[in-house]
Amino acid sequence: MDGMRSIMKLAVLLSVLLSSPHGVAQFSVADSIVVRALHDEILGRGECYENLRTLCKGVGHRLSGSASADRAISWGLSVLRSSGADTAWLQPVMVPHWTRGDVERAWMRVGDGPEQALAIAALGGSIGTMGTFSDSGEDGFVEAEVLMVKRFESLDTLGREAVEGKMVLFNRAMDPLLINTGSAYGGAYNQRSQGAVQAAKLGGVGALVRSLTHALDSFPHTGGMRYDDQVHRIPAAAISTIDAQKISDALKGDESVRVGMQLSCELYPDVQQANVVAEWKGSEFPDEYIVVGGHLDSWDIGEGAQDDGAGVVHSIEVLRALRAIGYEPRHTLRVVLFINEENGNAGGKTYARVAEEMGLVHVAAVESDAGAGMPRGYSLDAIDSSVVVIRSWAAGLEPYGLRSFRRGGSGVDIGPLKLEEPGGHRPVLVGLRPDSQRYFDYHHSDRDVFETVHKRELELGAAALASMIYLLDQQNWTGK
Amino acid sequence: MDGMRSIMKLAVLLSVLLSSPHGVAQFSVADSIVVRALHDEILGRGECYENLRTLCKGVGHRLSGSASADRAISWGLSVLRSSGADTAWLQPVMVPHWTRGDVERAWMRVGDGPEQALAIAALGGSIGTMGTFSDSGEDGFVEAEVLMVKRFESLDTLGREAVEGKMVLFNRAMDPLLINTGSAYGGAYNQRSQGAVQAAKLGGVGALVRSLTHALDSFPHTGGMRYDDQVHRIPAAAISTIDAQKISDALKGDESVRVGMQLSCELYPDVQQANVVAEWKGSEFPDEYIVVGGHLDSWDIGEGAQDDGAGVVHSIEVLRALRAIGYEPRHTLRVVLFINEENGNAGGKTYARVAEEMGLVHVAAVESDAGAGMPRGYSLDAIDSSVVVIRSWAAGLEPYGLRSFRRGGSGVDIGPLKLEEPGGHRPVLVGLRPDSQRYFDYHHSDRDVFETVHKRELELGAAALASMIYLLDQQNWTGK
């Protein structure tokens, strides 16, 4: 094994020496050898799957502000240090601190019938019903007749008279006809992010949002929501798709349908946590940075395996595998494990702000935040000439099933780097794109656990990410 | 809903009327509309997932010759009739009849230690140990010292002296570095198909074959094997990867390692079963046939959900969806549910022979026999000019994630159609290619059950198959 590794390291070294000095945009024989070596290293001796097991089973879910997020940060720092970073440190970030609390239940009453339990999860940031809020919930809950809508426009059409005092169920399903489930998520997302404000504007007393998933099951899928300072705050929760359907069916009858909920969630003052940053100095362009990352925080249910444990261990594996094959980066590589993607993006904003303040030139940033599925390619957010360069690598990546090179969003955490750099340079932003079909089955729910991750698919994702970082590193982006 | 469907049918009709009369090889606007309509129909109102549930949970596994295969045949005929076939019938096929029986166990003894149970499954076609075979198994079992090899060449090198009287463990793992798991399967497959003959030639008394899967777990994966009339028959079984590793570890010690097995499997005389054939007459080329199919038989463990329940319900859905959108085929379409792919391919051979005897011209055949995973494209087995035609559709299929159009095997059942047709025409053979990463986790084992199938992935597979059939139907393959 050691003999084989030495030979491989020599081949990689040789291939890099033989490659064109200033990275002409084409996929060379040297590139083939390195990309193959990265895949061999990760498929044959990968550590990302076991790292993910530790993160999911040892740390567990890790919402910003929680003690488990602190543990995840310590874990990330330690793993990055042992995976080949020159240096690694914590970059302080102030993050929100919202907690779900112990009480979270909902029920439906049809006419004079018995209470029927509903599966819900408070949306992140929601107020609770136990304390200050008591419009109709003197005993620490809110219960009201249900009004179901599928579009915000319907609320306006119905008007305050119909909405006032109601529990509003936003029940627009993700569109099954869209091939990419991310697009279907995008088409239903505003119910979760703005539903509470839309309902409250017209006097609604609570918002229930159909879980953002194609799966018809009993798991509520939480996620972030926002209030508006001009609008009264009302509690908001996600409801499982099966229970949303149950309410919808009940509303077809003649009897009144009432839904109650009791939530103990609370928002505390911001606390300091951190991004974890690891650095590997570049040999040729040490002052130009390439970032690869995912986010360390997760929602506070499930284990955050797909969202975004996968991106975290993918990113760490990039560093480990490039070291293992004997690669030496030309640019300075940074692995960044961002905090607080889920409810505020304080980590991504802080990282970009600090970089700007320090005048660091970021030539490229790549994020993995779309799960652990089989990688199918990359989404590209860059100027035209950079997109042309990246697309020129397609034939070389095709043997690995990487065939999609579409323009599109790269990732929430690296988004703030999109601002023009001081020198006028605009970094290339890339998102890893695993297959999307299963992602929202798990997303933000108790189903997002380690067992949903397929070892080889995870490894192939890491290898796709490492290959992209290697290829980006081969270019001279600023042309100096 | 009915209004929408009428409008869609009109659009499809219009698009077909507007399309070029003799199918120039390019993806037209009409093609886009039809392919989109097929996807909408199957994703929005698909029946393949519920059909698969019925096949898996109502019929269950269905090895050729079994009573459950008879039930599957009746079910297939009934579903095809209700899915829009003009006519459907059973085509008689003589198939092997091998049964596993009630007794199937294996054990390991290290030195004087206790019996340790091993997870095995007799390979299909293996002789049992209960009756006639008793070289060292007077009480109806065989037990012997283990010889482990990874390559057939090792047996020859070791020679008869080392092999004689031994239980031979073929323990070559599938190569994890190959991206396509089908290639890794191909590289380890001969251990299962020929291991017993190779061991017996040198006096081995039994063959144990490491299960053909990347998964490290406790499930044996069965499959077909062959004997050689010139070589003494010995019993052969698949062993779980964990237990193969356990034996391998034990062999590193100083103590003798013995493995025993007891199998009650038996081969009975061939019985008559059938291919299920459904036909939909073509409007323009009624005497030219396009086939779409999968195989109805499965191994006798698990439920045959991935192999090949998926292909069966994919194929039925093609017929249903083309009918539902108001399509009228130009060629005569046949859905064929083949029998006996797993241990003999009698169904595929019979279908091709009957077609030849009747002088039927088959211009194309498409098979789905690679599981229910996310479709990534098609494998093409055709003459160069036909491959060029099919690849010209790539841009139109790209929005559905169908980006792989490689040459390669199409499917075992349709393979016999590859023989030149009487008129000298060579049919285009196509295989649906779902993502391969998870397939061998389930393949031929108790894990191959309905629950492993993802509804949308299954539906997208059916839509990819339907789109290919539609596009093949648009061409004038014989140029008459």
Image (tube, coloured by chain):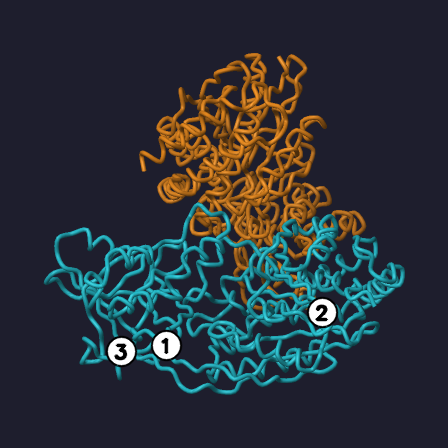
Chain colours: A orange, B cyan
Q: CA distance from mark 2 to mark 1?
A: 36 Å
Q: Residue B417, position in %: x, y?
A: 63, 71
Q: Residue B376, position in %: x, y?
A: 61, 53
Residue at 45% across, 57% down = B185
Chain letter of the residue beneath label 1 in the structure image: B
**Number of labelled discs?**
3
- Callouts 2 and 1 close, C-beta under 8 Å: no
Residue at 19% across, 51% down = B252
Of B341 and A302, nearer the camera is B341
Disc 1 secondary structure class:
loop
Mark 3 / mark 2, whichever is N-terminal: 3
Horizontal side, residue A268 vs residue B144: left or right: right
* Residue designated by label 3: B129
**Which amino acid lies under the numbered mark 1 shown in the image of this protein?**
Asp
Residue lying furthest left: B112
Residue at 46% across, 50% down = A454
Of B356 and B267, nearer the camera is B356
Q: Which mark is residue B424?
A: 2
* Residue designated by label 1: B229
Disc 3 secondary structure class:
loop
B292 is higher (above) or lower (below) than A103: below
Q: CA distance from mark 3 to mark 1?
A: 19 Å
Q: Residues within 10 Å of mark 3 (few under 14, many from 20)?
A: many
Q: CA distance from mark 3 to mark 2?
A: 49 Å
A467 is higher (above) or lower (below) than B215: above
Chain letter of the residue beneath label 3 in the structure image: B
Q: Residues within 10 Å of mark 1 (few under 14, many from 20)?
A: few
